[in-house]
Structure formats: structure tokens, C-alpha cells
Image (spheres, rainbow, N blue to C red):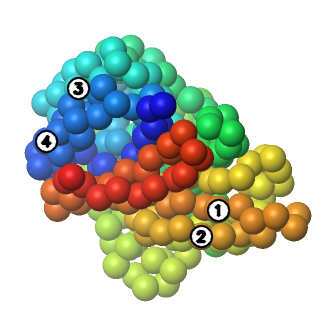
Amino acid sequence: MKPVLFIADLHLSDDTPDLTALLLQFLNRHAADAAALYILGDLFDAWTGDDDDSRTAAETAAALHAFSRHAPVYFIAGNRDFLLGRRYAEKAGIALLPETHILHAFGRRILLTHGDEMCTDDVSYLRYRRIMRNQTVQKILLSLPFCIRKKIAAKLRAASRRKKQSAAAYAVSDVTESGVQAALNRFPQVQDIIHGHTHRPARHEHIFRGKTVVRHVLQDWRDGKGGYLSLDAAGNITAHALPE
């Protein structure tokens, strides 16, 4: 049986054509041998609306749509592309999922999420997240001219880069045990968690109500390299490096 594939944190933009090329190579290679593809957020470095007319947006939509003719593609928004909506999803042939989704596949129950909601020590970011995920705020943002939205996104990215240079800020930007336990209390039947966001690819084990739950952190993409996870018919979740 064909495996299910997972990617996140590609941060595609016109400034990183090497990553777009890597995605196209990945999609072409696995179109015929994947059961499904899940994109767990931050596909783009900044998404300011479905009227994005960039070359990267067009190339990515065409490649995903071609892949979707062979296997379904699902998308969970990240902190950089939460404004991605139905218009672009239809163009790219992808199905939009809510912030958290339970995948039942090959005998496993897996919680899929971008992961930022589990970074509970980053209080200022969670406050920002609550504001930006508000539907009224999003409608106001999308009503602005595209050029204004791009300027706002550029300022937010610059602020994010400055924050990451702080050791203290970097420390609180990771997923916490309390964040994981809160997620598991909401979804107590899951056996695994797969997420991105932190750019700290790893495999972690957590104890919840006497059982072990494995948390898999996806590889981020940068400098022409990346990675993905696969779930095979035996229920194994395996990390793979890109390019292959």
C-alpha cells in the first residue's frame, strides 16, 4: 500500500527559487507512489491573500494541482499562511483542514497540526496568534489593498527575525510539555502527533495517562534542502531528507 506523506515549513517565496524547485522535484517523484500528502503549514514564507500574483504562488499551485490528480493533498495553515483561502485552494487542488485534524490511517490515530499552539511559554506570540486568527481581523486585513498587505507582512517578518536572534525568545518558541498535554487532553485517543513550526526536527516521547505518545517534528526547508515524514502500511513513521 502507498504511504502517506507529510511536509511543513517550506517558507516558499520568489527569493528562494531553490526551495520551489525542490518542492517540484519532490512532487514529481512521489506523485505516483503516495496515498496522500499533508502540508502542515508555512508552505509560503508570507501569504497575504489569494490574489497573490507571484511566480512562486503560480508554480506551486500548478505543481500541487498536478499531484492532486494522483493523490489528495490536504493543507493546515501555519503562522505565515493562515490567510490562504478557498480561491487558492481550488487553484492548487488542495483541501483545507482546520487547525487540528485527526488522521486515521494504517491502524494509527495521529494528531496533525502546525504546532504553534503548543508553544505555551511564548505568551506574546500566542496573544498575536489569537488576534490574527480572528475572522473579523482577517476580513479587515483582506479588505486592504494588496500592496499594503505586503508591507504589513514584511514588517511582521522583520520583527520575527529580530525576535529569533534573542536567546530567550528562541527558548520560549519551542513546544512545551504543558502544550502537548493540553493537546492530548483534547484528543486523548491519539497515538502520535505530527507538526512543524519549531524548525527543530526530532522525535519525542510523552507519557499521557500511562501510555506513550510519540511527537514527530517535521524538518524545515532551507538552503536548497528539506525533508518529509512518511507513514507506511505497517504504521511506521519515518523521516526522510531532501533532496533524495
Q: From mark 2 to mark 3, how far is it between C-alphas?
A: 32 Å
Please name which of the two marks, 2 or 3, marks the residue nearer to the observer: 2
Looking at marks 4 and 1 on the same chain, the residue that comes earlier in the sequence is marked by 4
Please name which of the two marks, 3 or 1, marks the residue nearer to the observer: 1
Residue at 45 percent of width and 47 percent of height = 230
Tag of residue 214: 1
Q: Name the residue under label 4.
A: 21
Looking at marks 2 and 3 on the same chain, the residue that comes earlier in the sequence is marked by 3
Q: From mark 2 to mark 4, how far is it between C-alphas?
A: 31 Å
User: At which x and y percent is residue 156?
Assistant: 36, 55
Looking at marks 3 and 1 on the same chain, the residue that comes earlier in the sequence is marked by 3
Q: From mark 4 to mark 3, how far is it between C-alphas?
A: 10 Å
10 Å crowding of disc 1: few (<14), some (14-19), many (20+): some
Q: Mark 3 points at which residue?
A: 63
Q: From mark 1 to mark 2, how far is it between C-alphas?
A: 6 Å
Up/down of 127 relative to 175, above or below: above
Q: Which amino acid is tagged 4?
A: Ala
The answer to which quarter of the image holds residue 39 is top left
Please name which of the two marks, 4 or 1, marks the residue nearer to the observer: 1
Q: Are marks 4 and 1 in contact (CB under 8 Å)?
A: no
User: At which x and y percent is residue 83?
Assistant: 44, 33
> Tag 4, which secondary structure?
helix
> Tag 3, which secondary structure?
helix
Q: Which amino acid is tagged 3?
A: Ala
Q: From mark 4 to mark 1, how far is it between C-alphas?
A: 32 Å
Q: Which amino acid is tagged 1?
A: Val
Up/down of 1 relative to 15, above or below: above
Q: Which amino acid is tagged 2?
A: His
Q: Are marks 1 and 2 in contact (CB under 8 Å)?
A: yes
Looking at marks 1 and 2 on the same chain, the residue that comes earlier in the sequence is marked by 2
